[in-house]
């Protein structure tokens, strides 16, 4: 079977796995207070050129979003604005609401939030009979495979500043966003854009783990309490430091992202060459082509992929996902099938 | 000033106030275990012809919605579906989310939910990565002044049965709904329609208080624990029993609702006669006429009302509300102004 | 039956009831934004000599504790310290925990908290694996009928300042505390002692209602959001302002408290004269005498009271409660029975 | 340095690490729906001789306790009883309370709960003004290193049955409990004792991970929703299945536990031989010897350990912990130091 189903089924990239094996029997302090986590945090601060950032390593994406937003939405009436395709809106089983906070869904054409969306939400929530919008959630790249350009991000930043909103970026697929051919954002731009963000490991070469980076001083206090309270503090915390050291150094992380995008690009060119269109303009490693139902039926016999809900002129969409582990052979075999 | 701003600013209707004064120095057991509450509960069971219903008296509307839904959504992943104009969606400062549950907003043209809306929500929430829809919230009459007809309610009931959903009806303005000229629902129909509902006192003649009626056996257990935990158990609980006895007996409650509707009808006829249209078809005591901005400006000098967000052809809407205390003179004076 | 069961079964004192009747049909803005609430708040600020205090009127005691502590414990890991007899510990069905915060129970001999208790709690909670103590809850008078003297309160204040803790005082029976013969605390001392406190109406002459007073600037922000979110914002908010105006002016509130204490004093003297002892030294309107089981059995035929769990030498305790409505005749009849 | 500080700092035991490396690049379904997790669950059902049990693999201990109890305490007023030394009481930063539920702390002499403790709690919580005890939390072995014998567990089971309480066992150190020389409990006894329990991996040979076993049918429903909502569903879920397969097969898990206990036994014998006493009778791999302060000072230079708060006759306690990785040489070196 050709695997184009997701970017999180494969294990760790070899560098990460080797680092875990090599450090396996080292003894170190628990709960993220070890030297590997310190080293990883230092390296990330260097990478993003923000010496005052706080870095916390967590285990998984939903956990990171839940822990971060439960921490940043400091009062019970604070709410977070998100595109209605946002991971926290639909795919986290109400994890944010479970911490007591409303997620304000914004309908968007393709999953990207704009300053105008924020303005409309602020205007609507006029007094204490409504929740108080206090944060904005974006994912980059988005769940629809799109990226935010630097000027789009700075415009969101401006809207957030205007309305005293925290800007939080979910970087589950940050490696793919930063290596997208349309991208003009660098690691070092992130602290100027987001109050906090996470560098996703799970989908970009780690066995598991996400690095939460807090830039805004007001959000730093007592974060370890909140991590522990959410059950998100790993006893052998060094496992996370070890992985991020291996991933981020020597540019491995971005190389893995670039590979996923490269495999996606071959797919896109091939699919277009066969005359098919895309429901969402392809930018990164998530692709949503329109195919005729018969083709989808045929593909399902030799390709692992997921259906997607958009339809047009008798055509349906499927979701194709490439990863750091996708091979050119797989991609070519897929193209031969269509 | 002509008061058409809301239906909750006036105090209690004379019968209710007299009953409170007469019983003021009676000693009785606390927390709703007294004879007045028992009598009120018995009377409600008789009224709705449902001898097995449980009745709890609470202090206020948001409190009742929050307490009821926190009780009925029994597991943390359970969520409630509502029209996006629903009181729990927008005007309760995230009270439901504060108990950990997501409210699923459904965009509706005019604030009424349909079985098709429910079907779409169920279809979308396909597995454990999504919250599990478990209840449907409707208000009757709605926040837009509309009522549900009996067949509409039975169709919602059927959709709920099909998908194992609880149907909960917010009856803040039940008196107006049941006495609307288009209405064909009786008190005794309610237990066949809703798993639980509340008979609103605050907006229909009481000083304060709402009577929560639980029909579905599965929702009855331990309700007093949940009321107490939400801070919703009044020490002098009998105040609520006393008021509902006074309100419901001799048909007072429905008479008050009918009066509000009657005053609204005069307004509607007069407004139409002057050539103005309504943004939402007028049915009960909430009216949303389109007026030119100059007229609205003029009205604001001698009428208390609230603005409303809908606009059309240079016209804006305001919200006019009649109540049991609105007088024909007030209504006529208003019509003379337009 | 002689009624010595509680201090919340009677309705409102005549002044309060008259004020409610007189203002019943006045129209005013909703949700506590009316002139009566403003007047009440102004009067309270004057009474406590704290012109910057914020005052919010809520409906009931558990609701006030829950709303206040959910607001003041600003982060999810913040917890509140309480004597284990405290109302929030045992008699509120976990209302504080339902907002996500731990209540740290402290075993005390008779229900009063000391600075040493606070020190021990702080020492024990050493790092982020523990909750962070952030507030101290005391009730004055306590659930055991005791009062805190001014020096005791100032010592608690000092301990709180030392450890950056909020001091919150539950004043459900503040009228009885401030009129206790052993008391040396005045209304105007309260802002120097507590960051926030409430003046209890329900047990001291109101039909219902508590006045939450916030002294500490840091706790004031957005309080109306939190009140609304907890379902604690009364539509006809003026009912609370009207009552507190009637209660507090002309010293009525303290006179009612003094009466309850005076009736209790007659009981105490009479019970002691008959040779009985008290399990907890009697100070205010809650009395815990040791009686032989036969006497308790006999009393239960003509007196309404509650059992209490303490025992000694074959004797058992009961709880006797006087109120603003207790009469000298009732008290004398009781003494004749023992 | 001799490492006797904890049993979670070391990485995975070689068998587990090898299994992770071997399966690293296998593609499989995500979120625990893969063949390794199925195989692991099947094996656990076989091991405990309970073919109907549900097994879920989670990432960490606090996460497992929080997820399980948030699921099992089905209504907001349900609470859990625990010895006040229990992990959920003190070392999880209020994780249970953060889900809205009260933890009822029971003072115990040495960290073990008895049926009498349960009876007292039940008696105290008499009506809806109190939380409703609905579950009992025990850890085996306890945080104090003690184990429950089979008859003690069956007595707790009986008390739970009597009062309709769920019995939940935290098995963070189950390997050490089941291989303690005083133990008479087998894997297959657990389903007769507990409604749910977890087999701890983190402290017994895994890189990370705990296997939650649900025996009671009533607790099984929708568990995957709750796991996802708590952020506890690992994308590469198979990592957990792979580890538990490696750990549990060929008896490795119990051998690792037995080794930790054996190393502890040598320590105990040696410490006793030198004339020192233990604050808590040593049974498993957590030891609490009384040492003179000078000795503790000396040890701190070449041994990693943690202080413990108990004191006696000028002696203080420290906590010594052995693990599957502790060597006889380390143990002997330690004994030479005292």
Image (cartoon, coloured by chain):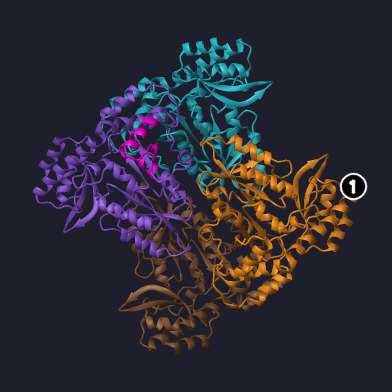
Chain colours: A cyan, B orange, C brown, D purple
Q: Residue at x 73, y 64 (%)?
A: B253
In the rendered image, residue B62, in percent from the top left (x then y), is placed at: 62, 55
Q: Residue at x 70, y 67 (%)?
A: B247
Q: Is residue D317 left or right of residue A159?
A: left
For the record, the magenta segment spans D37-65
Q: Is residue B21 left or right of residue C277?
A: right
In this view of the protein, which residue sits in the foreground, B91 or D154? D154
In the rendered image, residue D7, in percent from the top left (x then y), is placed at: 26, 39
Q: Residue at x 43, y 28 (%)?
A: A202
Q: Is residue B177 above or below residue C204?
A: above
The chain carrying label 1 is B
In the image, residue B66 lies in the stretch drawn in magenta = no
In the rendered image, residue B55, in percent from the top left (x then y), is placed at: 60, 62
Could you say which quadrant of the image residue D202 lies in? top left
In this view of the protein, which residue sits in the foreground, D90 or D35? D35
Regarding mark 1 in the picture, which secondary structure is present there? loop
Quarter of the figure with the C terminus of chain C = bottom left
- Provide the residue designation for mark 1: B275
- The reply to whether residue C32 is visible in this rendering is yes
Disc 1 crowd rating (10 Å Cα; few below 14, some 14-19, many 20+) is few
| Number of dots carrying numbers | 1
């Amino acid at each position: 079977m050709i695997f184009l189903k997701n970017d999180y089924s494969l294990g760790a990239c070899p560098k990460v796995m080797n680092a875990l094996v090599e450090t396996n029997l080292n003894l170190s302090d628990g709960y993220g207070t070890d030297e590997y986590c310190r080293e990883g945090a230092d390296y990330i601060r260097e990478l993003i050129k923000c010496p005052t950032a706080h870095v916390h390593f967590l285990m998984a994406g939903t956990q990171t979003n839940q822990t971060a937003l439960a921490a940043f939405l400091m009062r019970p009436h604070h709410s977070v604005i998100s595109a209605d395709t946002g991971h926290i809106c639909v795919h986290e089983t109400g994890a944010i609401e479970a911490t007591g906070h409303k997620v304000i869904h914004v309908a968007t054409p393709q999953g990207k939030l704009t300053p105008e969306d924020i303005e409309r939400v602020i205007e609507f929530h006029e007094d204490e009979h409504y929740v108080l919008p206090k944060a904005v959630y974006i994912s980059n790249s988005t769940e629809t495979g799109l990226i935010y350009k630097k000027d789009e991000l700075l415009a969101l930043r401006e809207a957030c500043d205007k309305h005293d909103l925290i800007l939080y970026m979910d970087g589950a697929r940050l490696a793919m966003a930063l290596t997208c051919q349309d991208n003009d954002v660098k690691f070092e731009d992130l602290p100027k854009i987001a109050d906090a963000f996470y560098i996703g490991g799970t989908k970009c070469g780690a066995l598991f783990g996400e690095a939460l980076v807090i830039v805004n001083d007001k959000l730093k206090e007592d974060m370890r309490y909140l991590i522990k309270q959410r059950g998100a503090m790993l006893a052998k915390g060094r496992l996370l430091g070890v992985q991020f050291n291996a991933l981020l150094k020597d540019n491995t992380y971005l190389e893995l992202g670039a590979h996923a995008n490269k495999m996606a690009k071959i797919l896109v060119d091939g699919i277009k060459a066969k005359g098919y269109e895309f429901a969402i303009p392809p930018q990164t490693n998530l692709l949503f082509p329109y195919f005729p139902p018969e083709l989808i039926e045929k593909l399902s016999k030799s390709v692992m992929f997921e259906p997607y809900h958009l339809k047009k002129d008798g055509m349906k969409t499927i979701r194709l996902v490439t990863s750091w582990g996708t091979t050119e052979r797989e991609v070519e075999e897929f193209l031969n099938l269509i």
